[in-house]
Image: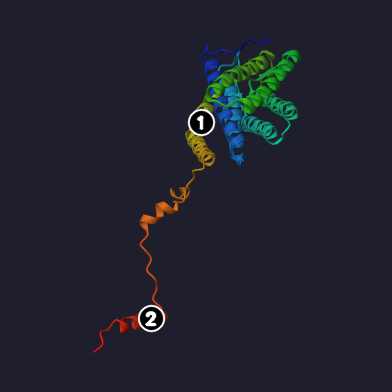
Amino acid sequence: MLELDHFNHGLLTPILAYLMSFIGSVLGLRCAVHARSSRWPGGWLIAAAVALGGCGIWVMHFTAMLGFSIQGTTIRYDVPMTLLSAAIAIVVVWAGLSIVVRVRREILALPLGGAVTGIGVAAMHYLGMSAMHAGAHVEYGVGLVALSLVIAVVAATAALWFMLHVHGFGATLGAAVIMGLAVCGMHYTGMAAMSAHHGDHSVVTQGVEPVELLTPLIMTVTLVTMMLIVLVGLAEVDTPSRSEAAELEEHAKDSGHSWPRMDPFADAPAPTQSARAPMQAPQQPVPTSVSLRASSSRAADHRPHH
Protein backbone atom coordinates (compact mmCIF):
# COMPACT_ATOMS: atom_id res chain seq x y z
CA MET A 1 0.00 0.00 0.00
CA LEU A 2 1.28 3.43 -0.94
CA GLU A 3 1.44 6.25 1.57
CA LEU A 4 -0.99 9.13 1.01
CA ASP A 5 -0.31 12.69 2.10
CA HIS A 6 -3.35 14.97 2.23
CA PHE A 7 -1.43 17.95 3.59
CA ASN A 8 1.64 18.05 1.40
CA HIS A 9 1.92 21.84 1.84
CA GLY A 10 0.97 21.88 5.50
CA LEU A 11 -2.14 23.80 6.55
CA LEU A 12 -1.94 26.14 3.56
CA THR A 13 -4.18 24.12 1.23
CA PRO A 14 -6.92 23.25 3.77
CA ILE A 15 -7.09 26.87 4.91
CA LEU A 16 -7.30 28.13 1.33
CA ALA A 17 -9.87 25.44 0.51
CA TYR A 18 -12.05 26.46 3.43
CA LEU A 19 -11.69 30.14 2.51
CA MET A 20 -12.86 29.44 -1.04
CA SER A 21 -15.78 27.41 0.28
CA PHE A 22 -16.72 30.23 2.67
CA ILE A 23 -16.57 32.92 -0.02
CA GLY A 24 -18.58 30.81 -2.45
CA SER A 25 -21.17 30.08 0.24
CA VAL A 26 -21.59 33.77 1.11
CA LEU A 27 -22.02 34.77 -2.53
CA GLY A 28 -24.30 31.82 -3.26
CA LEU A 29 -26.57 32.53 -0.31
CA ARG A 30 -26.84 36.24 -1.11
CA CYS A 31 -27.67 35.44 -4.74
CA ALA A 32 -30.31 32.99 -3.52
CA VAL A 33 -31.79 35.64 -1.20
CA HIS A 34 -32.14 38.02 -4.15
CA ALA A 35 -33.62 35.21 -6.26
CA ARG A 36 -36.43 34.81 -3.71
CA SER A 37 -37.36 38.50 -3.89
CA SER A 38 -36.88 38.94 -7.64
CA ARG A 39 -39.65 38.79 -10.22
CA TRP A 40 -37.30 36.91 -12.56
CA PRO A 41 -35.23 34.62 -10.30
CA GLY A 42 -33.62 32.65 -13.15
CA GLY A 43 -30.54 34.84 -13.46
CA TRP A 44 -29.98 34.96 -9.72
CA LEU A 45 -30.31 31.17 -9.49
CA ILE A 46 -27.62 30.74 -12.14
CA ALA A 47 -25.36 33.16 -10.28
CA ALA A 48 -26.00 31.29 -7.01
CA ALA A 49 -25.19 27.96 -8.67
CA VAL A 50 -21.93 29.33 -10.11
CA ALA A 51 -20.95 30.84 -6.74
CA LEU A 52 -21.89 27.88 -4.55
CA GLY A 53 -21.32 24.97 -6.93
CA GLY A 54 -18.36 26.41 -8.81
CA CYS A 55 -16.47 28.44 -6.22
CA GLY A 56 -17.77 27.03 -2.95
CA ILE A 57 -17.60 23.32 -3.84
CA TRP A 58 -15.56 22.55 -6.97
CA VAL A 59 -12.80 25.14 -6.43
CA MET A 60 -12.62 24.09 -2.81
CA HIS A 61 -12.16 20.47 -3.96
CA PHE A 62 -9.40 21.32 -6.44
CA THR A 63 -7.63 23.63 -3.97
CA ALA A 64 -7.56 20.84 -1.39
CA MET A 65 -6.27 18.40 -4.04
CA LEU A 66 -3.26 20.65 -4.64
CA GLY A 67 -2.00 19.48 -1.26
CA PHE A 68 -2.58 15.79 -2.01
CA SER A 69 0.23 13.45 -3.05
CA ILE A 70 0.89 9.73 -3.38
CA GLN A 71 4.31 8.49 -2.40
CA GLY A 72 6.50 7.67 -5.37
CA THR A 73 4.03 8.80 -8.05
CA THR A 74 3.37 11.89 -10.13
CA ILE A 75 -0.27 13.02 -10.15
CA ARG A 76 -1.77 14.28 -13.37
CA TYR A 77 -5.31 15.33 -14.21
CA ASP A 78 -7.54 14.63 -17.16
CA VAL A 79 -8.63 18.16 -18.15
CA PRO A 80 -11.97 17.31 -19.87
CA MET A 81 -13.10 15.12 -16.96
CA THR A 82 -12.00 17.75 -14.47
CA LEU A 83 -14.05 20.41 -16.26
CA LEU A 84 -16.97 17.97 -16.45
CA SER A 85 -16.87 17.62 -12.67
CA ALA A 86 -17.07 21.43 -12.38
CA ALA A 87 -20.09 21.51 -14.69
CA ILE A 88 -21.80 18.80 -12.64
CA ALA A 89 -21.27 20.77 -9.43
CA ILE A 90 -22.86 23.89 -10.94
CA VAL A 91 -25.77 22.04 -12.55
CA VAL A 92 -26.77 20.03 -9.47
CA VAL A 93 -26.66 23.11 -7.23
CA TRP A 94 -28.81 24.97 -9.76
CA ALA A 95 -31.26 22.05 -9.81
CA GLY A 96 -31.52 21.97 -6.03
CA LEU A 97 -32.01 25.73 -5.79
CA SER A 98 -34.65 25.66 -8.52
CA ILE A 99 -36.58 22.91 -6.76
CA VAL A 100 -36.63 24.83 -3.49
CA VAL A 101 -37.60 28.13 -5.13
CA ARG A 102 -40.33 26.76 -7.40
CA VAL A 103 -41.89 24.05 -5.19
CA ARG A 104 -44.08 25.82 -2.67
CA ARG A 105 -44.26 23.04 -0.07
CA GLU A 106 -41.03 23.24 1.90
CA ILE A 107 -41.55 19.84 3.50
CA LEU A 108 -41.21 18.28 0.04
CA ALA A 109 -38.81 20.73 -1.57
CA LEU A 110 -36.06 20.54 1.05
CA PRO A 111 -35.53 16.75 1.12
CA LEU A 112 -35.84 16.46 -2.66
CA GLY A 113 -33.56 19.40 -3.40
CA GLY A 114 -31.08 18.31 -0.73
CA ALA A 115 -30.92 14.75 -2.07
CA VAL A 116 -30.42 15.89 -5.67
CA THR A 117 -27.76 18.41 -4.72
CA GLY A 118 -25.96 16.19 -2.23
CA ILE A 119 -25.75 13.18 -4.54
CA GLY A 120 -24.60 15.47 -7.33
CA VAL A 121 -21.88 16.99 -5.15
CA ALA A 122 -20.66 13.54 -4.15
CA ALA A 123 -20.68 12.52 -7.82
CA MET A 124 -18.61 15.62 -8.61
CA HIS A 125 -16.09 14.69 -5.92
CA TYR A 126 -15.55 11.11 -7.05
CA LEU A 127 -15.59 12.07 -10.71
CA GLY A 128 -12.88 14.60 -9.95
CA MET A 129 -10.94 11.86 -8.17
CA SER A 130 -11.29 9.58 -11.19
CA ALA A 131 -9.83 12.40 -13.31
CA MET A 132 -6.65 12.04 -11.26
CA HIS A 133 -4.08 9.70 -12.83
CA ALA A 134 -1.11 8.60 -10.73
CA GLY A 135 -0.19 5.17 -12.13
CA ALA A 136 -1.53 3.53 -8.97
CA HIS A 137 -4.50 1.31 -8.20
CA VAL A 138 -6.99 3.31 -6.12
CA GLU A 139 -9.64 1.77 -3.86
CA TYR A 140 -12.28 3.26 -1.56
CA GLY A 141 -13.68 2.05 1.74
CA VAL A 142 -17.44 1.57 1.51
CA GLY A 143 -18.17 2.84 5.01
CA LEU A 144 -16.41 6.19 4.63
CA VAL A 145 -17.80 6.64 1.12
CA ALA A 146 -21.30 6.17 2.50
CA LEU A 147 -20.52 8.61 5.32
CA SER A 148 -19.25 11.20 2.84
CA LEU A 149 -22.46 10.79 0.84
CA VAL A 150 -24.56 11.36 3.98
CA ILE A 151 -22.50 14.45 4.83
CA ALA A 152 -23.00 15.76 1.28
CA VAL A 153 -26.79 15.33 1.44
CA VAL A 154 -27.02 16.87 4.91
CA ALA A 155 -24.78 19.78 3.89
CA ALA A 156 -26.79 20.39 0.73
CA THR A 157 -30.09 20.27 2.66
CA ALA A 158 -28.69 22.69 5.24
CA ALA A 159 -27.55 25.02 2.46
CA LEU A 160 -31.03 25.01 0.93
CA TRP A 161 -32.62 25.57 4.35
CA PHE A 162 -30.31 28.54 4.91
CA MET A 163 -31.33 29.85 1.50
CA LEU A 164 -34.99 29.82 2.54
CA HIS A 165 -34.64 31.20 6.06
CA VAL A 166 -31.52 33.38 6.17
CA HIS A 167 -32.22 37.06 5.50
CA GLY A 168 -29.67 39.36 7.12
CA PHE A 169 -26.05 39.62 6.05
CA GLY A 170 -24.80 38.64 9.50
CA ALA A 171 -26.90 35.48 9.42
CA THR A 172 -25.50 34.76 5.96
CA LEU A 173 -21.95 34.90 7.31
CA GLY A 174 -22.84 32.48 10.09
CA ALA A 175 -24.49 30.10 7.64
CA ALA A 176 -21.47 30.29 5.33
CA VAL A 177 -19.17 29.31 8.20
CA ILE A 178 -21.23 26.16 8.79
CA MET A 179 -21.51 25.38 5.08
CA GLY A 180 -17.77 25.75 4.58
CA LEU A 181 -17.10 23.28 7.39
CA ALA A 182 -19.64 20.83 5.95
CA VAL A 183 -18.21 20.97 2.42
CA CYS A 184 -14.63 20.56 3.64
CA GLY A 185 -15.72 17.77 5.99
CA MET A 186 -17.36 15.94 3.09
CA HIS A 187 -14.24 16.29 0.96
CA TYR A 188 -11.73 15.06 3.54
CA THR A 189 -14.04 12.24 4.60
CA GLY A 190 -14.13 11.04 0.99
CA MET A 191 -10.36 11.38 0.78
CA ALA A 192 -9.94 9.35 3.98
CA ALA A 193 -11.84 6.51 2.30
CA MET A 194 -9.15 6.31 -0.38
CA SER A 195 -6.26 3.88 -0.48
CA ALA A 196 -3.65 3.38 -3.22
CA HIS A 197 -1.63 0.34 -4.24
CA HIS A 198 1.17 -0.21 -6.71
CA GLY A 199 -0.07 -0.28 -10.26
CA ASP A 200 1.36 -1.08 -13.65
CA HIS A 201 4.44 1.14 -14.00
CA SER A 202 4.60 0.43 -17.74
CA VAL A 203 1.46 2.50 -18.28
CA VAL A 204 2.27 6.10 -19.19
CA THR A 205 0.41 8.57 -16.97
CA GLN A 206 -1.54 11.00 -19.13
CA GLY A 207 -2.90 14.42 -18.30
CA VAL A 208 -1.50 17.67 -16.95
CA GLU A 209 0.18 18.34 -13.65
CA PRO A 210 -1.71 20.29 -10.98
CA VAL A 211 0.60 23.29 -11.37
CA GLU A 212 -0.32 23.55 -15.07
CA LEU A 213 -3.97 23.92 -14.09
CA LEU A 214 -3.19 26.36 -11.31
CA THR A 215 -2.60 29.49 -13.42
CA PRO A 216 -5.78 29.33 -15.56
CA LEU A 217 -7.74 28.22 -12.49
CA ILE A 218 -6.60 31.23 -10.46
CA MET A 219 -7.33 33.63 -13.32
CA THR A 220 -10.78 32.20 -14.01
CA VAL A 221 -11.82 31.93 -10.38
CA THR A 222 -10.59 35.45 -9.60
CA LEU A 223 -12.48 36.92 -12.55
CA VAL A 224 -15.73 35.08 -11.80
CA THR A 225 -15.51 35.82 -8.09
CA MET A 226 -14.94 39.54 -8.69
CA MET A 227 -17.90 39.66 -11.07
CA LEU A 228 -20.12 37.97 -8.50
CA ILE A 229 -18.90 40.29 -5.74
CA VAL A 230 -19.72 43.34 -7.88
CA LEU A 231 -23.12 41.88 -8.83
CA VAL A 232 -24.07 41.06 -5.24
CA GLY A 233 -22.62 44.34 -3.97
CA LEU A 234 -24.71 46.41 -6.36
CA ALA A 235 -27.79 44.44 -5.41
CA GLU A 236 -27.08 44.89 -1.70
CA VAL A 237 -26.73 48.66 -2.18
CA ASP A 238 -29.86 48.87 -4.31
CA THR A 239 -32.06 46.77 -2.02
CA PRO A 240 -32.13 49.21 0.94
CA SER A 241 -32.98 52.14 -1.34
CA ARG A 242 -35.83 50.19 -2.89
CA SER A 243 -37.03 49.16 0.57
CA GLU A 244 -36.96 52.75 1.77
CA ALA A 245 -38.87 53.89 -1.33
CA ALA A 246 -41.48 51.21 -0.74
CA GLU A 247 -41.80 52.22 2.91
CA LEU A 248 -42.21 55.88 1.98
CA GLU A 249 -44.84 54.99 -0.59
CA GLU A 250 -46.69 52.83 1.93
CA HIS A 251 -46.48 55.62 4.53
CA ALA A 252 -47.84 58.09 1.97
CA LYS A 253 -50.78 55.83 1.26
CA ASP A 254 -51.54 55.39 4.95
CA SER A 255 -51.32 59.14 5.71
CA GLY A 256 -53.39 60.21 2.71
CA HIS A 257 -50.55 62.19 1.16
CA SER A 258 -49.22 61.04 -2.18
CA TRP A 259 -47.58 62.58 -5.18
CA PRO A 260 -48.83 64.79 -6.81
CA ARG A 261 -49.83 66.70 -3.72
CA MET A 262 -53.46 67.50 -3.11
CA ASP A 263 -54.83 71.04 -3.20
CA PRO A 264 -54.11 72.47 0.27
CA PHE A 265 -57.45 74.31 0.23
CA ALA A 266 -59.49 71.34 -0.95
CA ASP A 267 -60.32 70.16 2.56
CA ALA A 268 -60.78 73.68 4.01
CA PRO A 269 -64.30 74.37 5.40
CA ALA A 270 -66.52 76.58 3.27
CA PRO A 271 -66.68 80.18 4.57
CA THR A 272 -69.93 81.26 6.24
CA GLN A 273 -72.28 83.93 4.95
CA SER A 274 -71.02 86.46 7.48
CA ALA A 275 -67.48 85.81 6.43
CA ARG A 276 -68.29 86.24 2.76
CA ALA A 277 -70.37 89.40 3.16
CA PRO A 278 -67.54 91.93 3.68
CA MET A 279 -65.73 90.59 0.70
CA GLN A 280 -68.70 91.04 -1.71
CA ALA A 281 -69.54 94.36 -3.40
CA PRO A 282 -73.14 95.60 -3.02
CA GLN A 283 -75.27 94.48 -5.90
CA GLN A 284 -76.79 97.22 -8.12
CA PRO A 285 -80.23 96.70 -9.73
CA VAL A 286 -80.11 96.14 -13.43
CA PRO A 287 -82.13 98.90 -15.23
CA THR A 288 -85.02 97.77 -17.42
CA SER A 289 -87.20 99.58 -19.97
CA VAL A 290 -90.08 99.99 -17.46
CA SER A 291 -87.83 101.47 -14.82
CA LEU A 292 -86.34 103.85 -17.39
CA ARG A 293 -89.82 105.17 -18.43
CA ALA A 294 -90.80 105.59 -14.80
CA SER A 295 -87.71 107.59 -14.11
CA SER A 296 -88.26 109.87 -17.12
CA SER A 297 -91.93 110.59 -16.13
CA ARG A 298 -90.91 111.48 -12.56
CA ALA A 299 -88.31 113.84 -13.94
CA ALA A 300 -90.95 115.52 -16.16
CA ASP A 301 -93.32 116.08 -13.19
CA HIS A 302 -90.62 117.84 -11.26
CA ARG A 303 -89.88 120.36 -14.05
CA PRO A 304 -91.01 123.95 -13.32
CA HIS A 305 -94.11 125.19 -15.35
CA HIS A 306 -93.92 128.59 -17.06
Compare residues 90 and 193 and report the one nearer the observer.
90
Identify which residue is drawn at 75% across, 13% down. Answer: 143
Residue occupying the point 48% across, 36% down: 241
When the figure is inspected, residue 120 is found, relative to residue 46, above or below; the finding is above
Q: Is residue 38 left or right of residue 238?
A: right
Q: Nearer the viewer, residue 174 or 57?
A: 174
Residue 87 coordinates in the image, percent (x, y): 63, 33
Res 294 label: 2
* Quarter of the image that includes the C terminus: bottom left
Q: Quadrant of the N terminus?
A: top right
Q: Earlier in the sequence, mark 1 or mark 2?
A: 1
Q: Report the number of numbered marks.
A: 2
Give the Cα separation between the discs numbered 1 and 2: 103 Å
Which numbered marker is on residue 225? 1
Q: Residues within 10 Å of mark 1 (few under 14, many from 20)?
A: many
The image shows residue 129 at horizontal and vertical percentages of 66, 23
Image point 53% across, 16% down: which residue?
15
Answer with the quarter of the image where residue 197 lies: top right
Please, what is the three-letter code of the amino acid marked with disc 2?
A: Ala
Q: Is residue 280 left or right of residue 217?
A: left
Q: Nearer the viewer, residue 208 or 84?
A: 84
Asked whether residue 242 appears in the rendered view, the answer is: yes
Disc 1 element: helix
Q: Is residue 133 left or right of residue 225?
A: right
Is residue 24 shown above or below 281? above
Residue type, label 1: Thr
Mark 2 burial class by Cα count in 10 Å: few <14, some 14-19, many 20+: few
Give above or below for 253 relative to 236. below
